[in-house]
Amino acid sequence: MEIDKHSSDDALAVQVAVLKYKLDYSQRMIAERLNMSTMTVSRILERARKLGIVEINILTPIENHWNLEQQIENSFGIKKAVVFRNRYEEMPDDLLGRAAAQYIDYLLGPNDNIGISPGRTLAKVIPHLKLSMLKKNNSLNVIQTIGGFSTAESFSPVSILQEFVNNNNGVKGHFLNLPIYAPTVEVHNTLIANGALDSITRLWEKIDVMLFSIGPVGDDSIYRISEMLTSAEMNDLISEGAVGSVYGRWYDHKGHFLDSEINQRVFGIPIEIVKKIPMRILITSGKNRIETIKAGLLTQLCDIIITEENTARALLNIS
């Protein structure tokens, strides 16, 4: 029987990586244990990194930028702004995912009802949540606030909710088994009249904390990427003045929701219910989305904004 050399090499790479990074052996100790030179150990560890057996994450310090926070609060009339420093020019979404999760970890209570919306930024946050304050007696409820997508994207509401539940014991997820957009206004209204949202609406009315993001128009929109809107529908929204979306609904540069047929087809939490939620946390970043973010703040659906300093500076138009 032939021995697969690559499989054997990979197994050795795993063994050496475990000794080094899990058991804290020095390269000299590994060399002695496995009867090889330290140079060979070094080469195997390099191979382990190239194979993806070992991933190196550099966790930069999480620091608040107090001055920018105060300026954002004063400029946009927000109860609380949380702005993280970006000293090392990290990708904004990556920094924000890690930093926002740390902030949210200590904000959530064990009996809270959490509303979840879709978005690429929010998808970066969920994997970093530890909920260390809730490990005991955790009865957290996480509630999907808009309908699902036709594709299994990481930023879809179902994917985000499922990861939240999978990563945290004791969390109960509540799904909305409808698409984000009905095919027509008539279909939407018929389903609503027949009680399609009655049970989930009762849960929406109990939400204590809403975690949400806002999205841009155009082909970069999650609703285009997931094919929930056609190119023609997106062009119609742009021609009507749309600059961004929240909860699947499209708004203009003044933060006014469009009187659009597409907005009338949304299966999602009503805006009047959102406005009654005690804590509404917008997690967003991106210097290329400043118009979208500014107009999103004008919708008055945000109590707390969490962002990073480059985005904050752009919002304030300062260098």
Image (cartoon, grey):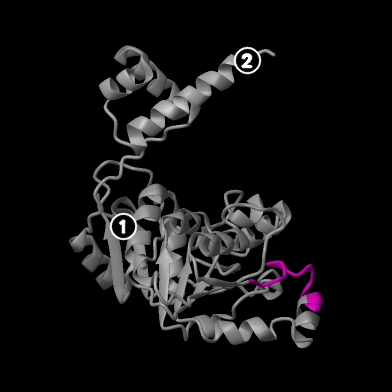
174 to the left or right of 289 = right
Measured as percent of width and height from the top left, residue 197 is found at 69, 82
User: 310 above or below 24?
Assistant: below
Callout 1: SS: helix
Specify the segment rendered in magenta.
175-187
Q: Which residue is mark 1?
A: 312
User: Crowdedness of circle 1 by 10 Å Cα count: few (<14), some, many (20+)?
Assistant: many
Residue 317 in picture, x, y percent from top left: 29, 56
Tell me, for residue 83, which label it has, or none: none
**Residue at horizontal 59 percent and vertical 63 percent from the top:** 157
Instruction: Give the residue at mark 2.
Output: 3
**Nearer the observer, 57 or 209:** 57
Counting from the top left corner in percent of width and height, residue 309 is at 28, 54
Considering the numbered disc 2 on the image, is that residue within a helix, a strand or a loop?
loop
Q: Earlier in the sequence, mark 1 or mark 2?
A: 2
Queried whether the magenta region covers residue 181, the answer comes back as: yes
Residue type at the position of mark 1: Ala
The majority secondary structure of the magenta stretch comes to: loop
Q: Position of residue 171 (x, y in %)?
A: 51, 71
Q: Marks 1 and 2, Cα distance to the nearest angstrom? A: 57 Å
* Relative depth, front residue between 46 and 1: 1
Q: Nearer the viewer, residue 140 or 269?
A: 140
Magenta stretch: includes residue 155: no
Point out the image quarter for the N terminus: top right
Q: Quadrant of residue 160?
A: bottom right
- What's the amino acid at mark 2? Ile
Check the image and report above or below for 117 versus 259: above
Q: Is residue 12 above or below residue 253?
A: above
